Image: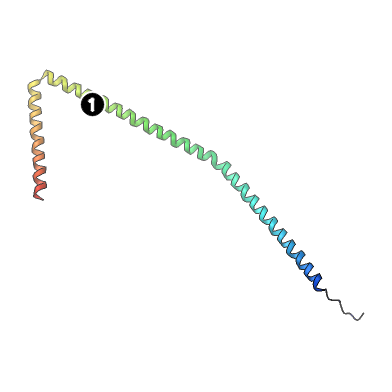
Amino acid sequence: MFGIKPTPSSATLAESATRSVDHALGATRQATNDALDDLGNAAHQLRDKTGPMIDRFSDQAHALTRQGMDAVRDQSLHLQARARRASEDTRHYVRDEPVKSLLIATAAGAVLMALVGLLVRSQRDR
């Protein structure tokens, strides 16, 4: 009548505040769920994209390892064959030229002993 508005009661204010808090919690919960869903989807997409790449890199690493092992094996076999050939050549040379072989072996032994003597003497002088 006189332009005075009735003030809401404290119960009405509390109900209004409770509805506002419930609404804010619901919106926050929904936003959190949406963000977690987006994060999960991004993780799945990343796994789907990187999985084949990781598999390819792994396969390449295995292939390179295999190639390296094969190369080492081949080189080892090659060196063994060369050592066998050198041994056979030496055996043939000793059989064909026994005096020369003996003189060469003696000279090589003398040079080796002289080198060892120098090394021992230089170690003692320090």
Measuring from the top left, give residue 71's x and y in whole percent: 35, 31
State left or right for residue 61 relative to residue 95: right
Measuring from the top left, give residue 23's x and y in whole percent: 74, 61
User: Compared to 29, does 15 lie above or below?
Assistant: below
Quarter of the image where the N terminus is located: bottom right
Quadrant in the rendering for residue 48? top right
Measuring from the top left, give residue 31's x and y in whole percent: 68, 56
Residue indicated by mark 1: 83
Q: Nearer the viewer, residue 119 or 16?
A: 16
Q: Residue at x 40, y 32 (%)?
A: 66
State left or right for residue 6 relative to residue 62: right
Q: Residues within 10 Å of mark 1 (few under 14, many from 20)?
A: few
Q: Secondary structure at mark 1?
A: helix
The three-letter code of the residue at mark 1 reads Ala
State left or right for residue 98 relative to residue 89: left
Q: Residue at x 16, y 19 (%)?
A: 92
